[in-house]
Image (spheres, rainbow, N blue to C red):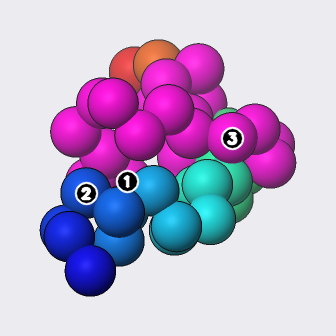
Amino acid sequence: MKITEFFKNLPPKHCHKCGEVIEEQHECYHNQCERCLSDLK
Ligand SMILES: [Zn+2]
């Protein structure tokens, strides 16, 4: 299995705060979506 196929088969991440699906394109070190992260600022 190619590594790209491995990532495609991963289920989408969900924000632990609001439950929104987190876009995998971004470098996500957090378990929250951009909107919730910006709320923290
Ligand atoms: Zn969120």
- The response on whether ligand 1 sits within 8 Å of label 3 is no
Which percent across, then down, holds residue 38?
47, 19
Q: Which mark is residue 21?
A: 3
Query: Can you identify the residue that label 2 sits on?
Result: 4
Query: Can you identify the residue that label 1 sits on?
Result: 30
Quarter of the figure with the N terminus: bottom left
Q: Magenta span covers which residues?
A: 18-37
Q: In terms of secondary structure, where does tag 3 sit?
A: strand
Neighbour tally class for label 2: few under 14, some 14-19, many 20 plus, Cα within 10 Å: few
- The response on whether ligand 1 sits within 8 Å of label 1 is no
Question: Is residue 4 in view?
Answer: yes
Neighbour tally class for label 3: few under 14, some 14-19, many 20 plus, Cα within 10 Å: some
Q: Main secondary structure of the magenta part?
A: loop
Given the image, on which type of amino acid does mark 1 rest? Answer: His
Q: Going by the picture, which residue comes out furthest to the bottom? A: 1
Q: CA distance from mark 2 to mark 3?
A: 20 Å
Question: Is residue 40 in view?
Answer: no
Q: Which mark is residue 3?
A: none
Which percent across, then down, holds residue 37?
47, 31
Q: Verify whether residue 34 appears in magenta.
A: yes
- Nearer the observer: mark 1 or 2; the answer is 2
Q: Is residue 27 above or below residue 6?
A: above
| Sequence-earlier tag: 1 or 3 | 3
Residue drawn at x 33%, y 30% is 25
* Residue 6 placement, left or right of 29: right
